[in-house]
Image (cartoon, helix red, strand yellow):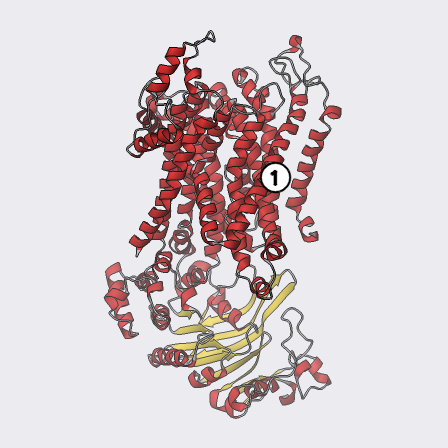
Amino acid sequence: MLKDYFIRRALYLIPVLIFISFMSFSLIYIAPGDPAEIMMTSPSGGYDEAAVEAFRIAHGLDQPFYIQYLNWFKGAVVGNFGYSYMSEQPVFETVLNAFKNTLTLSVLALVIALVIAIPFGVVSALKHNTVVDDACRFCALFGVSIPNFWQAYMMIILFSVILHWLPPSGFGHGTEISYMILPATVLGTGSAAVMMRMIRSSMLDVMGKEYIQTARGKGLSEKIVIIRHALKNALVPVITVIGLSIGFLLNGSVVVETIFGWSGIGNLVVDSILSHDYMMVQGSVLFVAVIFLLINFFVDLVYVWANPEIRYDRNS
Amino acid sequence: MSDVLLKVSGVSVSIPTGQGAVHAVDDAAFSINKHEVFSLIGESGSGKSILGQAIMRLLPPNAVFSGKVELGGMEISALSEKEMQKVRGKTVASIAQNPYLAMNPGIRVGTQIAEPMRAHLGMSKEEAKARTCRALKYFDIIPPEVREREYPFQYSGGMLQRAMVAMGTAADPELIIADEPTKGVDVLKKRNIAAIFQKVASDGCAFLLITHDVGFARAMSDRIAVNYCGQIIEIAGRDAFFKEPLHPYSQALLDAVPERGMHPIPGSSPSMIEVPEGCRFHPRCPYKTDRCLTNPPVVKLEGRCVRCWIYA
Amino acid sequence: MIEILKNRQIILSLIILGGLIFMAVFAGVLAPYDYKEKDLQNRQQPPSSDHLFGTDHLGRDILTMVMYGARASLFVGFAVVSVSLAIGVTLGVLAGYYGGWLDEIIMRLTDSFLAFPSMFLALAITAFLGQGMENMMLALIAVEWTVFARVARGSTLDVKTKGYVRASRWVGASNSYVMIKHVLPNIISPVLIMASIGIGNVILAAAGLSFLGFGVQPSTPEWGSMLNAGRTYFSTAPWLMFFPGLLIMMTVLAFNYFGDGLRDALDQKMKNLELEGRF
């Protein structure tokens, strides 16, 4: 049953979730220096012993490690990631808001990636071993090799500084599309390249299948053979790449959001590190890991569901 | 009006590979009458399947084709790809060897069977569905309304085999090309396949059976052609052929079946890239003479023909 | 091996990589200037015959810095991948070979590391360990080893079912003998491919971290930190960013191209293996 598979997969998540929470929490303990001292140090260098002690108590830093972890874990389960050292705001809310902005950008980037990857991947496979295929494959390799921070600046120079088409950076209240185009394109490039390669090999694989020849033998036009018989089957494995791409997009968000001043989770992490807001770093990293894990979990389920044959294999 | 349905003349196919060109089909010439079951027999790898693909015009893109194929008086080898699409599945259909590979795993069986009807008979979705259900019932795939909605992996092997025949016959073709229908199949299943094919043949459909299975060909066919190393070396009526095979290779082939004591043919099949000079069978032939080093003529004898110097 | 050297893609990428390594090793001889040499009279000069790639905001020659920068990037790439490979392959082979609870633990550990998007994990570790090249390399190792663990485990499981391995166990070969004699040779190809792609990915990630200011500090010439330094002047002096970025891309592309060529040349069936990098 699909349900049994679902449950088994969900059970696998539990040890991983516990471990990643532990990893996120311990990060603070590998840090040299006492966060309370760092936070309470005034710009002139001195600090007030009483204020440091008060900070420790306020943030529970005076308790033993395992108690701190358990308290934090209990909170984390119900969405309480503690309070920012800097703004005293709840970490979870800040992270959630930032993540919503990252999500907006990522969805747009994913759409851009798919729009590029599907046609090029298919054409590359259909023109297998020709100059067109070689060019497509080289472009894909190029796409995964280009440093996104560099690409971002090169695009800003071209589209903002020289052509004045798009704003160089800014948030635009998170809704203005003109602010999203450049960062989303930069984010989407790497994913597009990975997806294109995947679609190409998947399409090549399917086009060599006997049922494609059967479909031709029925007198269907090549267009119908490709769209109805090949593309549908070729795109099923691509679902798994979308999971992989989420990782790509989240990774990219760190640099891209910082450069474009987009108030997303990548930007939040970098800012929090620079301001030693360890609580926020910890919370963001855990949040991103959980989201990433869950997305991959659902992607896997969708893959199983979309693929009747696998569904059958795993049932029996 | 002539009774000839398919006429193949002077067809050659070669496929370039890294090691050189494979001459898969050389100067093939034969014809199949309406309602006739015609078998092309020969060892695996002797180019039989390529001939089937050549008739359907579904050769690999790099294959080099020459010759003429006429179907119902129309020269299909000269049609454009667009026109050929109207012939495939409509006048001539093919049935592949392995139903698990030949059916699309991601599309419902009913939809796959209905495709030729929609493409060639101009049927609406509902009409095609009704006809598909009738076809499934005709081939004992019941209950058709349920089976129609299932995917290939939900079918048993025998059922899928029948579904594939239903798909091949969906648009009432006049000729079916069946490629190795009994390869890797046990005796019981072979009998079932024979029964389905006979059912279709009795409805008036002609068959080109491409097989290495001499017994199956004997049970099914009206006429037999023997293929050796890319060439058709003998064509004869079934009874005449099994009573008295003329070509030395035909004789050896029949002696190699279990019922006749399983005498192996001496030597081994030559490479399809460097074929022997003259008669392709001469290195293994017990009757070979010097003239066998030049190409043997196709000798016509009453109702049959053979490519051998002995009968010249 | 000779087959591999007939592959044009591999030859081409080897030539480029050889050139880059040559440039890194002999930067002291090849570079037109001293990378520490500041020339405040000639700040932010555009490319010219004196300074082919222009000069930076302190008047240092960009071409010189790019050449020295190859040292840091290539060193980080090779060092991180070597250590990751050693850790990952050891754990992966042990997990795949012994199976059972050991496999379970190692794989859940791998899953946990994989659960973090790599950039976040690397960033968090560098953030808490403190900035600097060594800490950045530790962070990158923490990310990169999982790739090798998974590939090594997969290939080991695959080899384990082969008849000759089972046979050699039946005749009493010891576990370590089987692992070294049968398992290791079989996982070399996928691991080599992953190593090549991995070096490219690590160089890219290291440059990213340095660009953000968490890796190599601006005092050492490194491509990522050069880009970081050039950010402020990107609209007035774009060459400050253009050339180091171009070098990063060329290097990463060469490693990817090499890995891709290896994959095609070494084994057809490996095309089905999911050999994607971590970054």
Location of the C terminus of chain A (image quadrant): bottom left
- Residue located at (63% from left, 14% from top): C45
Residue located 69% across and 52% down the image: C1
Please, is residue A293 above or below residue B5 in the view? above
Circle 1 sits on which residue?
Answer: C82
Direction right: furthest residue: C29
Residue A208 image position (x, y, % from top left): 48, 58
In the rendered image, residue B233, in percent from the top left (x then y), is placed at 58, 81
Q: Residues within 10 Å of mark 1 (few under 14, many from 20)?
A: some
The kind of residue tagged 1 is Ser
**Where, by quadrant of the figure, is residue B20 drawn?**
bottom right
Question: Where is residue C227 shown, x and y percent of the image?
Answer: 56, 22
Residue C125 in the image: above or below residue B127: above
Image position of A6 (left or right of B47): left
Label 1: which secondary element: helix
**Would you place residue C261 above or below residue B185 in this image?**
above
Figure quadrant of residue C138: top right
